[in-house]
Image (cartoon, helix red, strand yellow):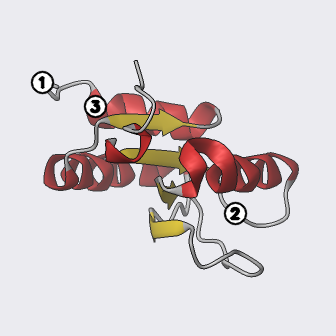
Amino acid sequence: MIVKGQENSLRVLLVGPALSGGGGEVHFRNLAARLFDGTADVLTVLDSPPEGLSTDRRIIASLGWRSELSYPRMARQLRAMLCQRRYDVVLGFGVFPNLLVWLATRTLRS
């Protein structure tokens, strides 16, 4: 439960496909700008140019998808990032970002 006035105290990571011009990517860009008042960190699966994005969006990295063989490497990268930054909430948007979040978090205790 989010208590009024404590929304920004949550450490939130949004994991999505990319932030460029594709249909799902546009929806993810809009969610990243508006969900949690735009204060959540944003991680993309694909490298995408941050053109036209406002500076208040917190794009922290891209996992650099190259092929289907990239998933184990990306899951390890995401798991290391989650252990280091200690997010309270991790949300994936789309089938493959959700798969990565599941792979990265399935062995974490909290």
Read off the residue under disc 3: 105
Compared with 88, 39 (above or below) is: below
- Judged from the image, the secondary structure of the residue bearing numbered disc 2 is loop
Q: Nearer the viewer, residue 1 or 58?
A: 1
Position of the C terminus, as image quadrant, is top left
Read off the residue under disc 1: 109
Can you tell which mark lies on residue 16? none
Q: Nearer the viewer, residue 70 or 7?
A: 7
Tell me the CA gap for discs 1 and 2. 30 Å
Mark 3 touches mark 2? (CB < 8 Å): no
In the rendered image, which quarter is residue 85 located in?
bottom left
Q: Please, what is the three-letter code of the amino acid marked with disc 1?
A: Arg
Q: Position of residue 5 (x, y in %)?
A: 42, 38
Is residue 11 something one can see in this rendering?
no
Q: Nearer the viewer, residue 70 or 13?
A: 13
- Is 42 positioned to the left or the right of 46 in the image? left
Q: Please, what is the three-letter code of the amino acid marked with disc 2?
A: Leu
Give the residue at x 40% y 18%.
Answer: 1
- Is 37 positioned to the left or the right of 89 in the image? right
Can you tell which mark lies on residue 19? 2
Q: Position of residue 31 (x, y in %)?
A: 69, 46
Q: Sort mark 1 into few (<14), some (14-19) or many (20+) by Cα contacts within 10 Å.
A: few
